[in-house]
Image: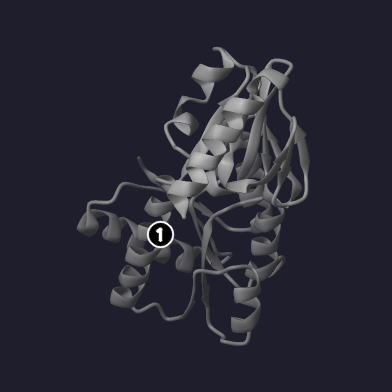
Amino acid sequence: MNIKIAVCDDNIHNLNETIDLLKEYSNISKTKLEITGFKNGQDMIENIQKQGHCQLYILDIVMKNENGIQIAENLRKLQCNCEIIFLTNSNAFAAESYNVGAFYYILKPIDKQKFFNILDMAIKKIKQKQNNCIVVSTKNGLCRILLGDILYVEKFERIMRYHCKDNIVINSLTLKTNFKQANEILLENNKFYLCGASFVINLQHVVCVQGQTLTLDDNQKLTIPRNTVTEFKTIWGKYWLNEI
């Protein structure tokens, strides 16, 4: 799988220099990178809305219109679970960069070997995420969801609705198969349990079972089918015995 990287810098020379370094890194490391350059944040955000998120964003901080910090804030508002590397001539924004969950903050001029070492670390983290997530097709493009963030999945009309931490709800495109088959990847993980025909529940987030009502760790209540209660309690109990 290619690692998608977006680079944003309003200085065309610096933009091309960063892209050239990424291409060199790709050749040396044998890592397949899909690199797209942008001269401003607005074009980058519009591209995300059409094409979906990248895994890594490399942003200049000091730009004429939106600065890199503001662009990163917009990425987080779009629920972008990505890595962000800032490039800048000034260390004045270091504290702000970590407020938006930056992976690294690099002062210009870029030291090539240091840059490559940081890319090694960032891509290692991205690959770890890929092994612990699913990718869902939505009307706004592909959306990557960490397995640990999923509370439960429900069938809603002809789509799947992913209920995640922090009150985030993600709707899939129309199902082209049955609910169980559509959740095969989740069900390969022992944290997830198919409860009836319309729910897949993350056992890790269930803190209490009373009758048909499950209480999740965000205090949300979920009612499951009556005929699944006994089996669910057994599976849930075994899960936590193994975890402990």
Decide if residue 67 is in sight here.
no
Would you identify the image quadrant in which residue 98 lies? bottom right
Numbered marks: total: 1
Check disc 1 and give the amino acid type.
Lys
Dot 1: what SS?
A: helix
Q: Position of residue 190 (x, y in %)?
A: 45, 38
Residue 36 in the image: above or below residue 176:
below
Residues packed near mark 1 inside 10 Å, few (<14), some (14 to 19) or many (20 plus): few
Q: Is residue 166 visible?
A: yes
Which picture quadrant has residue 188?
A: top left
Q: Is 156 left, or right, of 131 in this rendering?
A: right
Q: Quadrant of the N terminus?
A: top left
Q: Position of residue 199 (x, y in %)?
A: 64, 26
Residue 146: % across, % down: 53, 47
Q: Nearer the viewer, residue 69 or 9?
A: 69
Q: Is 83 in front, or is 133?
A: 133
Left or right: where 2 falls relative to 159: left
The residue drawn where x is 56% and y is 87% is 91
Q: Which residue is mark 1?
A: 125
What colouring does the structure picture have? one colour
Residue 83, given in percent of the width and then of the height, sits at 51, 60
